[in-house]
Image: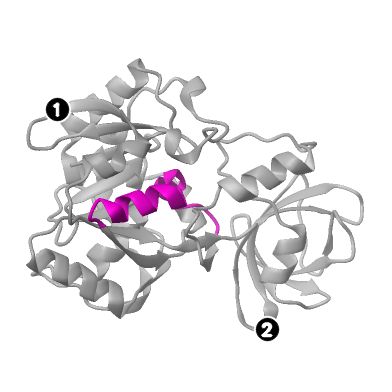
């Protein structure tokens, strides 16, 4: 597949800048691969739209408040994005500044009392740094960090504290429990505790995997041929209980419904050629694009993805390019909301 085939027209005003007032009140486009039917629903009807006995696999990663605002000693502002903590409290992070940063320079967090000393530039805009005074990254981020919203969601630097807190709450699934992501598994943002109770009451079960979504999820494909794209790696865990639940469901003929492309990537990483899931953990750079034979996933709950993205390539692989582009054209015509805070799609 050529990268140019991942493009579609999206009016910029359809990029959602805020979440729906209620998580499960988002719109849901249902796409049937067998019939080609596309119809409009509401997300809170998911228990009526999935077959009884379905197993939903969700990503329980927890988004860190990884977006940082700092200042140089000259007073200039620096925007940062925490990526991960290495040994001895060293941080890997992305930094943007109007002027060239230098190793040995210290950046002060806006709230005061905490600095970050730059150690080494390791890539384009990527640095190693050490917090001064030293403390676990999670504790520092909890005090100084903001929700790491993707760049297409615009926020004013002077946003009031209550607005920032709303993003911290809503850019997080209700079942998040494993800190480590710097971007949300956005298909899961539509679920509420009440909806999950209704799914269980309707005869469906849930299982969890973990994939700590990295900044590479927003990285554009810069090659013409998808076979030449170097996929970013992300840490994952598939526990034994989930592997057993998936294998049992498949043996019984019950559909496995992945919630989000991140769950798909874990399931397909851990499956053997016969579709048996093996509990494991580590780093995956699996890149799913047409043609791809899915080993485990039968259905998918997902959001609407960026043109030219690896996520859209995965959806094409599952449902076919022509059908998905037709669904996206219909979503544009009917003014669906797109991307992280937008509406959802169920691919049956």
Tell whether 225 sits left or right of 133.
left
- SS of the residue under disc 2: helix
Q: Residue 184: say if magenta.
A: yes
Residue drawn at the location 69% of the way across and 51% of the way down: 146
Q: Is residue 122 above or below residue 87?
A: above
Of residues 260 and 11, the one nearer the viewer is: 260
Q: Residue furthest right?
A: 74
Tell whether 214 sits left or right of 207.
right
The numbered dot on residue 107 is none
**Secondary structure, magenta segment, majority class:** helix
How far apart in space, not on screen, are marks 2 and 1 (Cα)? 54 Å
Residue 26 visible in this rendered orientation of the protein: yes
Q: Position of residue 244 (x, y in %)?
A: 22, 75
Residue 118, located in which quarter of the rendered image?
A: bottom right
Q: Position of residue 24 (x, y in %)?
A: 43, 39
- SS of the residue under disc 1: loop
Give the residue number, with chain letter if any, for mark 1.
37
Q: Which residues are magenta?
A: 182-204
Of residues 319 and 59, the one nearer the viewer is: 59
The quarter of the image holding the C terminus is top left
Residue drawn at the location 15% of the way across and 65% of the way down: 249
Q: Position of residue 30 (x, y in %)?
A: 24, 33
The numbered dot on residue 88 is 2
Residue 1, located in which quarter of the rendered image?
A: top left
């Amino acid at each position: 597949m050529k990268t140019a085939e991942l493009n579609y027209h999206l009016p910029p005003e359809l990029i959602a800048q805020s979440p729906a007032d209620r998580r499960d009140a988002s719109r849901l486009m249902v796409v049937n691969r067998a019939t080609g039917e596309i119809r409009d629903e509401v997300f809170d009807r998911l228990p009526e739209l999935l077959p009884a006995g379905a197993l939903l696999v969700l990503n329980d990663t927890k988004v860190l408040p990884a977006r940082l605002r700092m200042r140089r000693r000259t007073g200039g502002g620096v925007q940062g994005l925490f990526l991960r903590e290495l040994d001895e409290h060293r941080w890997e992070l992305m930094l943007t500044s109007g002027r060239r940063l230098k190793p040995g320079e210290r950046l002060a967090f806006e709230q005061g009392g905490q600095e970050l000393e730059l150690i080494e530039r390791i890539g384009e805009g990527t640095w190693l740094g050490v917090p001064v005074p030293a403390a676990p990254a999670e504790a520092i981020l909890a005090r100084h960090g903001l929700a790491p919203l993707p760049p297409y969601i615009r926020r004013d630097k002077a946003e009031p504290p209550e607005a920032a807190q709303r993003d911290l709450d809503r850019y997080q699934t209700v079942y998040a429990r494993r800190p480590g992501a710097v971007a949300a598994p956005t298909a899961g943002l539509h679920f509420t505790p009440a909806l999950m109770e209704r799914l269980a009451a309707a005869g469906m079960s849930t299982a969890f995997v973990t994939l700590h979504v990295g900044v590479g999820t927003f990285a554009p494909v810069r090659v013409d041929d998808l076979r030449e794209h170097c996929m970013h790696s992300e840490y994952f865990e598939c526990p034994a209980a989930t592997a057993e639940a998936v294998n049992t469901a498949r043996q019984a003929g019950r559909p496995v419904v992945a919630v989000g492309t991140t769950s798909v990537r874990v399931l397909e990483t851990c499956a053997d050629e016969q579709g048996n899931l093996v509990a494991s953990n580590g780093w995956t750079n699996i890149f799913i694009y047409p043609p791809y034979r899915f080993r485990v996933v039968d259905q998918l709950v997902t959001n609407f993805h960026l043109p030219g993205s690896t996520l859209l390539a995965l959806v094409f692989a599952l449902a076919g390019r022509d059908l998905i582009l037709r669904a996206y054209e219909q979503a544009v015509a009917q003014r669906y909301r797109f991307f992280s805070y937008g509406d959802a799609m169920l691919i049956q």
